[in-house]
Image (spheres, rainbow, N blue to C red):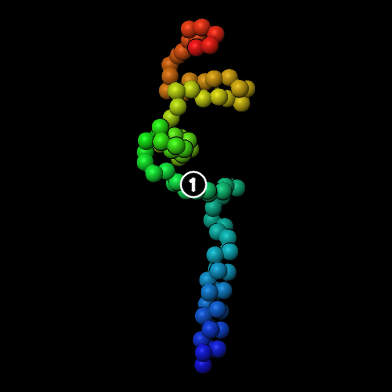
Amino acid sequence: MKRWLVLAMTLVVALGLLAGCGSDTSKSGKHAGLGLFWFGETLDPTHEWDAWTLTRIGAGETLATVDKDMTFQPQLADSWENVDPLT
């Protein structure tokens, strides 16, 4: 009796896992949905890696960003200027 119960439970779990492998043909286009785990402890951008995580999930922004040509583009800042070569 115990062997049949274990076999039945294994079969149910296997069928459940296989059911998740099906495809939904109602969606159009090639699109991958991804998630990002929240490893932050607070919403404080000065705490460890929280600023990076907040920016990646779209909850935070930076003053400027770097484009594909490695030039600075404004994001929150309107403009900026160099006071001297080091500042």
Name the residue located 46 percent from the left edge and 13 percent from the top edge.
Answer: 80
Residue carrying label 1 = 36
Q: Nearer the viewer, residue 85 or 64?
A: 85
Name the residue located 37 percent from the left edge and 35 percent from the top edge.
Answer: 44
Rendered position, 51 above or below 63: below
**Residue 44 visible in rendering:** yes
Rendered position, 14 above or below 86: below
Q: Secondary structure at mark 1?
A: loop
Rendered position, 55 above or below 41: above
Name the spot of residue 8 as percent of width and height, x first: 53, 83
Name the residue located 58 percent from the left edge and 60 percent from the top edge.
Answer: 23
Q: Residue furthest right?
A: 69
What crowding class fits label 1: few (fewer than 14 Cα within 10 Å), some (14-19), or many (20 or more)?
few
Q: Nearer the viewer, residue 1 or 49?
A: 49
The amino acid at mark 1 is Leu
Q: Residue furthest bottom?
A: 1
Rendered position, 30 above or below 68: below
Name the spot of residue 38 as percent of width and height, x first: 44, 46
Q: Nearer the viewer, residue 55 or 44?
A: 44
Name the spot of residue 24 as percent of width and height, x first: 55, 59
Q: Is residue 68 left or right of residue 75?
A: right
**Residue 58 visible in rendering:** no
Name the residue located 43 percent from the left edge and 30 percent from the top edge.
Answer: 61
Name the spot of residue 71 as percent of width and height, x first: 58, 19
Q: How many marks?
A: 1
